[in-house]
Amino acid sequence: MSEDIALKRLYWHSRRGMWELDLLLLPFLEHRYPDLDDADKAAYRALIEEEDQDLFIWLMRREWPENDALRRIVKMIVEYAETTSNDQYRTL
């Protein structure tokens, strides 16, 4: 499978049933994911396999994942959202 097709599939798997999750996951995927190392890319792919309610709790910083790799990628996503000009994130 080509990298382009894999990224498109990942994009659709990153779209969630919650607007708040889309605001965090999609910009990170588009702007940061391509530059991640293989371990962090694998962590992102594992992260989006988790349930929406778990993602929401983690990405809203109410709790952190127990798994070190997931915790690392969640912190990267939150940090990216907090340091970019994503005005929609500020409404969360």
Image (cartoon, rainbow, N blue to C red):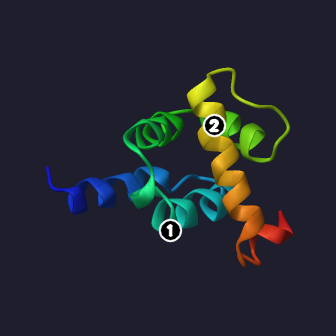
Left or right: where 54 falls relative to 91: left
Report if residue 41 is visible in the image: yes
Label 2 belongs to which residue? 72
Residue 66, position as x, y percentages in the image: 69, 20
Indicate the quadrant containing the C terminus: top left, top right, bottom left or bottom right. Answer: bottom right
Considering every residue shown, the one lying at the far top of the view is 66
Which quarter of the picture shows residue 61? top right
Earlier in the chain: of badge 2 and badge 1, it is 1
Label 1 belongs to which residue? 31
Q: Residues within 10 Å of mark 2 (few under 14, many from 20)?
A: some
Left or right: where 4 falls relative to 90: left
Which quarter of the picture shows residue 52? top right
Instruction: Give 61 or 18, whichever is nearer the viewer.
Output: 61
Is 65 above or below relative to 55?
above
Residue 86, position as x, y percentages in the image: 71, 75
Dot 1 lies on which element? helix
The residue sitting at 49% across, 42% down in the picture is 44
Is 88 above or below relative to 57?
below
Left or right: where 24 falls relative to 48: right
Residue 25, position as x, y percentages in the image: 58, 56
- Please state which amino acid type lies under the numbered disc 2: Arg
